[in-house]
Image: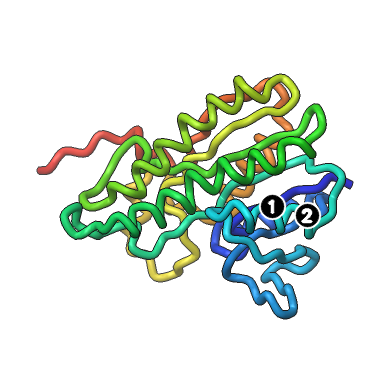
Amino acid sequence: MKRAIVTGGAGLIGTGICAALVAAGYEVASFDVAGDTAVKTHPVEGVRAIECDVSEEASVEIAIAEIGWEGIDLLVNNAGATSGALGTPLLDLTLADWRRITDSHLTGAFLMTRAAAPLMPAGSAIINMASTRAFMSEKNSEAYAASKGGIVALTHALAVSLGPKIRVNAIAPGWITDATDLSPQDEAQHPAGRVGRPQDIADAVLYLATAGFVTGQVLTVDGGMTKKMIYAE
């Protein structure tokens, strides 16, 4: 049985990824700060929940040791703080908040990759979660955009450094939600005709996990929004 670690596995996208990997036959461990650390529960049945703050070097090392696996076939670096990541004006953005956001996304991906890579056999894969906000922005999103842009660059650097043994790719999600109260305008602004769902990202993970001739790439999964020209009328 193949084994996968998903960081941020208790969140919206992470839960979808974990469920898809379990269904595909993987043994899955979710690394997250949001789990119930007393009973090690997870929203998806069959997923092992491990407490881990991916931005802390010691926490990552402890979590990797706790799972006790001799091999890791897939690492999905999906963790990252979202609270305060968007909407804070630049002049109000504290250094502590900047570091909290960039460390949880970018530094976390580095620390997890460095810890997991020695346990990953030839043919294994790493998938980093970027964002379309690495390529386009709204106001007041500097820390988040910088983090995701860094992940794009980290991805191609790792692909060169770890290849051909380990393939490294990234996914750049657009608007992904499980909300049911969306307006027709919300759906219609996507060329695909709808807003994205967690399963859309999980499907991309399953593809990249086995796409043997794909490495160093960013797969944008956004319903076509970044390809749509918008003019005020």
The residue beneath circle 1 is 61
Q: Label 2 sits on what residue type?
A: Ala
Q: Residue drawn 66% across and 37% down?
A: 126
Q: Would residue 223 be found to the left or right of residue 65 on screen? A: left
Q: Label 1 sits on what residue type?
A: Glu
> Residue 80's mark?
none
Task: Rate crowding at label 1 as few (under 14), some (14 to 19) or many (20 or more) other CA atoms within 10 Å.
Answer: some
Q: In this view, does 81 lie above or below 193?
A: below
Q: Residue drawn 80% across and 57% down?
A: 67
The residue beneath circle 2 is 65
Q: What element carries label 1?
A: helix
Q: Residue drawn 47% across and 37% down?
A: 151
Q: Where is residue 142 in the image (x, y as percent from the top left)?
A: 28, 47
Q: Position of residue 215 (x, y in %)?
A: 62, 24
Using the rendered image of the protein, determine whether residue 133 is visible from the camera's viewpoint: yes
Q: Where is residue 175 in the image (x, y as percent from the top left)?
A: 41, 52
Image quarter where the C terminus lies is top left
Between the residue at mark 1 and the residue at mark 2, the CA separation in whole angstroms equals 6 Å
Q: Would residue 233 be found to the left or right of residue 180 on screen? A: left
Q: Are marks 1 and 2 in contact (CB under 8 Å)?
A: yes
In this orientation, which residue lies closer to the viewer: 164 or 98?
98
Q: What element carries label 2?
A: helix
